[in-house]
Image: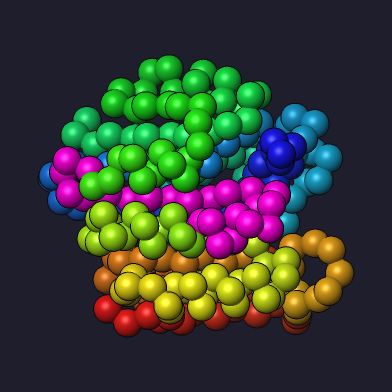
Amino acid sequence: MLSYRHAFHAGNFADVLKHSVLSLVLDYMTRKEKGFCYIDSHSGAGMYQLADAYAQKTGEYKDGIAKIINDEDAPESLEPYLSLIKSLNLSHDKSSELEVYPGSPGIAKAFVRRQDSSHLFELHPTDIQHLEDFCQRWRKVFVKQSDGYKGVLGLLPPPSRRGVVLIDPPYELKEDYQKAVKTIIKAYSKFSTGTYILWYPVVKRELVEEMQQAFKASAVKNVLQVEFCMAADTDEYGMTGTGLFIVNPPWQLTTQLEEILPYMKTKLGSNETSYTLTQLIAE
């Protein structure tokens, strides 16, 4: 199944959480001179045009990034993320619409340096073409139209012994929930000091609980779980929230998320909105 297109959802509340965390993790990695490896299992198109039919059909970015991009009260922890989005839309003043929004490769491209390498995987035939076009002038980036789960495992451990792995599947198949966790468990056995970010949608609570249990039953240590839900869990179809499992998070990430989450609730949420931040597994 290759029907999922992230262009419909680019810049929504889930992207705000996922990409603000990714920005903080990558910013932290660049504080040391030694290079690192960035691996993205489900990369998407790289960059999204918010004026195109996909984004305009849902308009999800209007209730996400558009609400905070020019907010002067945004916490300092969001600065790396918001500065990046602003830099991609330099021609715009505060009264104009956003034109572009980066996918995770677009976020990574802004942070990686000459000494860093990037490995991007994507299976969708249209998105892989967009991704290859986006990466044309990007040095030390390797783009493959292949299974990202296998691709992650094949690259670990990286030569530098420093790495960030993002696993962000579309969850078109129910099996993806467990497959994503199992991939991180296998990756951790090969490279236990890497930072792993696993994104998930909150659609059915039992699927999230099964992911939690799989992590707890494994040898993986130091797992932070963050979740932001726009509405209460429901049996009806549709995503009510979003979350991340972060293995080996930067030491200050918990404090940064303690600033970001209440801000997101105030700016993007409602009375039904809730969030949690939990050290799921100790170091």
Q: Nearer the viewer, residue 176 or 195?
A: 176
One can see residue 233 in this view: yes
Image quadrant holding the N terminus, namely: top right
Q: Position of residue 57 (x, y in %)?
A: 83, 40
Q: Is residue 89 above or below residue 156?
A: above
Coordinates of residue 169 in the picture (x, y in percent): 58, 49
Q: Which residue corresponds to the image point at 48% horizontal and 51% vertical from the top-left? A: 167
Is 237 in front, or is 182?
Answer: 182
Residue at 44% x, 72% y is 215
Answer with the quarter of the image where residue 95 lies: top right
What span is colored magenta in the figure? 158-180
Looking at this rendering, what residue extends furthest in the left direction? 33
Whole-percent x and y of residue 15?
Answer: 59, 53
Query: Residue, x 63% and y 24% (percent of image)?
Result: 125
Q: Is residue 120 above or below residue 176?
A: above
253 drawn magenta: no
Residue at the (47%, 45%) spot, across then down: 149
| Residue 88, above or below 13 | above
Quadrant containing the C terminus in the rendered view: bottom left
